[in-house]
Amino acid sequence: MHIERLDFENSPYLGVFGLATDKFALVREGLQEKKLNVLREVLKVPVIETSIMKSRIVGIFAAANSSAVVVPYYIWDSELEKIKTSLEENGLDVRVEPVLSKLTAFGNLILVNDKAALISSKFTREEAKQFEDIFGVEVERGIIANYHAVGSVGVVTNKGGLVHPEATDEELEWLEDLFKVDFYVGTANMGVPFVGSCMIANSFGVVVGHLTTGPEIVKIEEALGFLG
């Protein structure tokens, strides 16, 4: 199964609490084993439970592709060590980089896959260069549908992308050119346009909030390359 509905303690905003790449997933601590097993089965990668700055909103604070994870500079040493150790135990050579910035909601402000990254234009050009070095991909600064929270209004994998319904045709073309995948507009969780906050996805599968409707699921499957 490429797509499953799920809730994290009755919350349909899965992307707030986790993220996935084609090598690993990071999720909040304290989930039931049954739900962790759904994540493993759908995403087909090791699932690492953690907190960031003693918070469970891991998907808001962290952003990642297969090569690297960026976390706020203020992450606790024990949390940083846990993430690094868990990656190493799974045989993964992934850079985990605390970044000092006035902005700490990296998951909300960065849209990234293994080919490129779009970061909020609130980041400085110097920070853009830093992210380029960490992720090892081309980085552009910008907005989507007039939102700086590009990681909240979009989700991108190495197979496809889905963004806020108010994204323009020009923005879709620009995103496709940057990320080298097709992009669609859509919603999740019964009409929520902040799709990045509603799901955790990689090239193998996607878990969406349990309120997501059938028509929304069809569009998500199409956008992320699971149809046809």
Image (cartoon, rainbow, N blue to C red):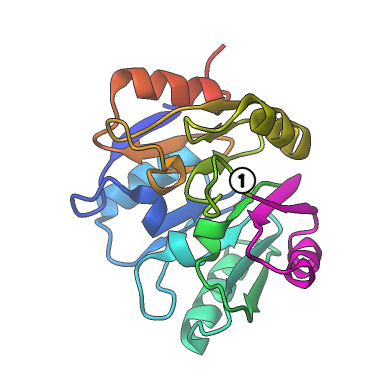
Q: Nearer the viewer, residue 70 or 26?
A: 70
Residue 161 % position (x, y):
59, 33
Q: Nearer the viewer, residue 6 or 61?
A: 61
Q: Is residue 156 above or below residue 63?
A: above
Residue closest to the far bottom: 77
Left or right of 42, for residue 173: right
- Check residue 50 for magenta coloring: no
Do we see residue 65 in this rendering? Answer: no
Residue 2 % position (x, y):
45, 28
Local secondary structure at mark 1: loop
Count of numbered labels shown in the rendering = 1
Residue closest to the far top: 228
Left or right of 131, for residue 60: left
Segment tinted magenta in the rendering: 115-142
Residue 102 % position (x, y):
58, 78
Q: Nearer the viewer, residue 93 or 103?
A: 103
Q: Is residue 169 above or below residue 7?
A: above
What residue is at 41 percent from the left and 26 percent from the top? 1
Q: Is residue 58 above or below residue 65?
A: below
Tell me the residue that label 1 is attached to: 22
In the figure, residue 131 lies in which quadrant? Answer: bottom right
Residue 88 % position (x, y):
62, 69
